[in-house]
Image (tube, coloured by chain):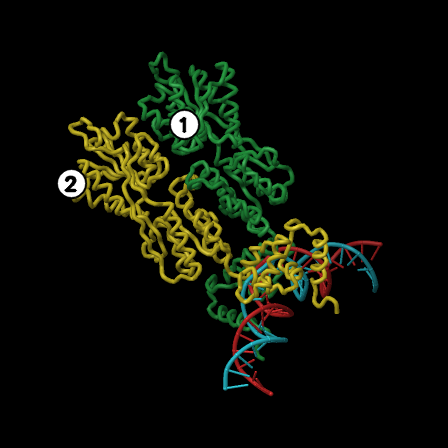
Chain colours: A yellow, B green, C red, D cyan
Amino acid sequence: MPTPPSAKTPAKAKETGREASSGPAKGKRVGIREIASKAEVSVATVSMVLNNNPKITASTRQKVNRVVKELGYRPNRIAQSLSSKYTNIIAVLMPTLRHTMADPYFGELISGICDKAARLGHKVMLEHAKPDFVREKRHVDLFDRRYIDGVMCIGFSDKHTFLRDFADGGHLAMMVNNVATDMDLDYVVCDYASGAEQVMTYLSQLGHRKIGMIHGAPDVWTMRQMMEAFRARLVQDSGGVADGVMVDGRFTEEHGYAAACRLLDKHPDTTAIFAGNDKMALGALHCAAERGLRVPGDVSIVGSDNIQYAAFVNPALTTVNTPLYDAGMLACERLVERIRGRKEPVAEVLPTHLVLRQSTGIVRQNGVAEPAE
Amino acid sequence: MPTPPSAKTPAKAKETGREASSGPAKGKRVGIREIASKAEVSVATVSMVLNNNPKITASTRQKVNRVVKELGYRPNRIAQSLSSKYTNIIAVLMPTLRHTMADPYFGELISGICDKAARLGHKVMLEHAKPDFVREKRHVDLFDRRYIDGVMCIGFSDKHTFLRDFADGGHLAMMVNNVATDMDLDYVVCDYASGAEQVMTYLSQLGHRKIGMIHGAPDVWTMRQMMEAFRARLVQDSGGVADGVMVDGRFTEEHGYAAACRLLDKHPDTTAIFAGNDKMALGALHCAAERGLRVPGDVSIVGSDNIQYAAFVNPALTTVNTPLYDAGMLACERLVERIRGRKEPVAEVLPTHLVLRQSTGIVRQNGVAEPAE
DNA sequence: CCCATCAGGTAAACTGTTTTACTGAACGTC
DNA sequence: GACGTTCAGTAAAACAGTTTACCTGATGGG
């Protein structure tokens, strides 16, 4: 019998055709079987060579590698994934906001994730948690349908309870710069509480007592950390938190602007504003400029995150540096560790520090502003 | 021997175990074969039902779908990709800059791409063209190893000649907001030439004759479009292009700032600055503020791209609106069309328009600034 | 001298789908 | 009534790797 079951003949025929053309990496479809026959070894051997299995002799290894190079063979990752159970892809899951990716906050995190993932040989896939996406459990599908090995969650809040599905389904998920309370998911987060305290200490040193805060959604854990630190210090320094001294800026420039306006309307004696991120701080800056208030002469403004443009707005923004890029890197590294078998949960906190620029100064005296030190 | 070859028994045992527990979507590993046997049809039939093959009767279809729902079956995408030749993944390839993703320019494009891709049932994978990545031809590997069906290229210039590999290898690639001259790659691009002309016309109307430009790398096609439009209008309006009136701001705030400083040093009589993107414009704004120049009183500044924060810097930035998000969407739509068989090349140009804000005004008279209209 | 072990390699099973070639029944037509 | 056609569905061959169980010849120890 020349050809026992099947498929041997067509394969051989094809192979011959390719041999004739002989160019490396040219014809499509160079498979492991061609390599095996050309190198006169079995496909198992080729596979083992490619995966650096120590079982194989140096000489065989060489022989195979030469053919691999000659034919420009690249293993088909789909087939590899099918048998190996690993896709080497991780997803970055984020909420649907207006043009999410254009937000430097997410951008920094994702940059860190991507750079580290590339270094570790993983691909990164982007995914938005739209309402219907969640409703149809497509976030679980990512795992069930074998798209990915793990997921990084960014920008979520307590109300995104579907995150629980990951832990429940035994899927690897990592919260990046966030903590999911009582869900026991891995996390890597910047120390926002400390950041906020540093801000309050600094403002206090400058003599500020009438401080307002523009915050984002309080169902975001990190924001709560900042709000609590702010509130605690305010109570301690001035005996109480006045109504309307904390206004919601919803994380955006627009609403930050509106929030600053409301704050200054209700409390014209405010001498300093602490914004929960740089975008809201920029909104506040805009509001101050519009009202002819000088920054920091009349009012000091502090942001948080130290995104790229913070140093270039007018005046340059004093802000909390949260190492977002590093957080992304670390989170990615840890997630890959877990994919590769790490058992201990991950709970990392990265230090933050205040970056002093031109938007803060000592408190104004009797309506007359003094320059910052 | 109780177990003939292998793995048959454990599989069956598992299956039975699952049947006992009977919960939907709970145990892992529900395959098309289980569905088939439970529904008492062949796996081919199940496959056809799932792919809406009209060959199947409504009654069979129902029967199968019921079982599918019951067991919470989700087809394994890896296996699907292996036989179907499509992965339903597209890559976004971009250069390695510092924290690329944190740039709102890229962010807007990618947001558009992602949103459209999700709507069309495709996943998006992120990839950076680092030097070694290109050297090892890994951009070609993306196709050869079956990671992706097509690639979107953003942020590249003429010197990125490796893009040629896509066309040469018969791989589907799309330039987004860019044109690769003499490479015949598909593209979707915003009309930067027109944008620049609108800027020049407007500045001219305001009486400006001494106009400087802060540009980015001229080996980026879109930037060249702007530079040419600028140069053409300058020659026409004032009889020549003075040396040093065009300075390189390398697309960033930092270098835009430095470029503005150089420009104003060399030509203190400059009354208007046209920056090739908003980041460089912000740098220029910063430089002006630092020198005590009033914008637009002493110098008008125009940006390009109309990224989110442009409306909130001080003063709010007049800029060219380039519909980046829409460009991303359209590019993605067209790329998917090509994946699905479209033959005609894609060459789309999206209109741009000027957005007037506070950073521009009529030319200053004899060193005395007049307010904008 | 004989059996156990081991190094190096192989054939075949396995991953979970899609697709192709085929089959049996019903139906219409001449 | 024999013969094409559809129709609806099936068995098995792809897809391109990894992994497992086995094989063989050489070595080594008692």
Determine whether, in the image, residue B34 is placed left or right of residue A296. right
Q: Position of residue A247 (x, y in %)?
A: 27, 38
Q: Nearer the viewer, residue B205 or A139?
A: B205
Q: Position of residue B109 (x, y in %)?
A: 48, 38
Residue A67 quadrant: bottom right
Q: Is residue A288 visible?
A: yes
Say which residue appears at 42% left-offset and 46% top-offset.
A110
User: Mark 2 = which residue?
Assistant: A238
Q: Position of residue A61 (x, y in %)?
A: 58, 62
Determine whether, in the image, residue A7 is placed left or right of residue A212. right
- Quick one: SS at disc 2? helix
**Image quarter hosting the N terminus of chain A:** bottom right
**Image quarter hosting the C terminus of chain A:** top left
Q: What type is the residue that disc 2 sits on?
A: Ser
Say which residue appears at 47% left-offset and 61% top-offset.
B25
Q: What type is the residue that disc 1 sits on?
A: Ala
1 vs 2, front mark: 1
Residue A50 quadrant: bottom right
Q: CA distance from mark 1 to mark 2?
A: 47 Å
Q: Is residue B64 above or below residue C8?
A: above
Q: Is residue C19 above or below residue A6?
A: above
User: Mark 1 = which residue?
Assistant: B259
The chain letter under disc 2 is A
Q: Is residue B58 visible?
A: no
Asked whether the beta carbons under mark 1 and mark 2 sit within 8 Å of each other, the answer is no
- Report the disc number at residue A93: none
- Quick one: SS at disc 1? helix
Assess disc 1: are there few (<14), some (14-19) or many (≥20) residues with their C-alpha within 10 Å of its C-alpha. many
